[in-house]
Amino acid sequence: MPLKDWLAWGWLTEHRASRDEIQKLLAVADRDLEQSAAEGLGADWRLAIAYNAALQCATAALTAAGYRATREAHHLRVIQSLEFTLGWSASDVAYLDSFRRKRHTVGYEQVGSVSDEEAEEMQRLARQLRREAESWLSTNHPELR
């Protein structure tokens, strides 16, 4: 199901990206990657901050592709769009989505449910996504780099 179908279903809106907009999204991701590694933060917060870095990278890719996710299920749609933007597999998308659900739990429902290993894995995944987004943008949308 291509992104144009999502547009027809109202899950996305068309958007013309600017270089400045993409740079700002990636700058937020870079900041969050750095701050998610700050000493003294609990695993819950490290995961949440690293997740936000990953979300900003996925948003940059979706934006560069000419779309924005609508409000309903915004995070889910942005993550799922990685299959169509960066070419992620369904299993990789599902793996990142498991961290979206975990972030929701620690943000709204339960304290202390993230292990140090999970926080470190989310940081690793966010760094990987940052590198892949940079490469994809350079190849597919060099005017936005």
Image (cartoon, rainbow, N blue to C red):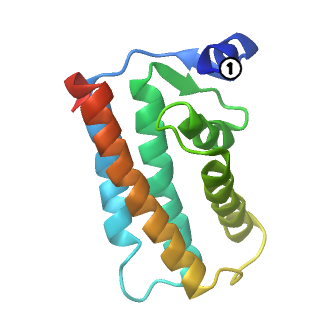
Q: Which of the 4 image quarters holds residue 100? A: bottom right
Residue 97 horizontal/vertical position (percent): 67, 54
- Element under label 1? helix
Q: Quadrant of the C terminus?
A: top left
Residue located at (42% from left, 53% from top): 129
Q: Which of the 4 image quarters holds residue 32? A: bottom left
Residue, far top: 8
Q: Which of the 4 image quarters holds residue 2? A: top right
Residue located at (55% from left, 66% from top): 48
Label 1: how many residues lie within 10 Å, few (<14), some (14-19) or many (20+)? Answer: some
Say which of 47 and 107 sits in front: 47
Say which of 142 and 16 sits in front: 142
Left or right placement of residue 19 versus residue 62 in this view: left
What is the total number of numbered labels drawn onto the structure image?
Answer: 1
Q: Is residue 41 above or below residue 14?
A: below
User: Tag 1: residue type?
Assistant: Trp
Residue 33 horizontal/vertical position (percent): 36, 64
Left or right placement of residue 134 versus residue 66 in this view: left
- For disc 1, the marked residue is 6
Q: Is residue 87 above or below residue 31?
A: above
Residue 117 horizontal/vertical position (percent): 56, 84
Residue located at (65% from left, 64% from top): 103
Residue located at (24% from left, 34% from top): 138
Q: Is residue 2 above or below residue 49?
A: above
Q: Quadrant of the N terminus?
A: top right
Residue 102 horizontal/vertical position (percent): 70, 66
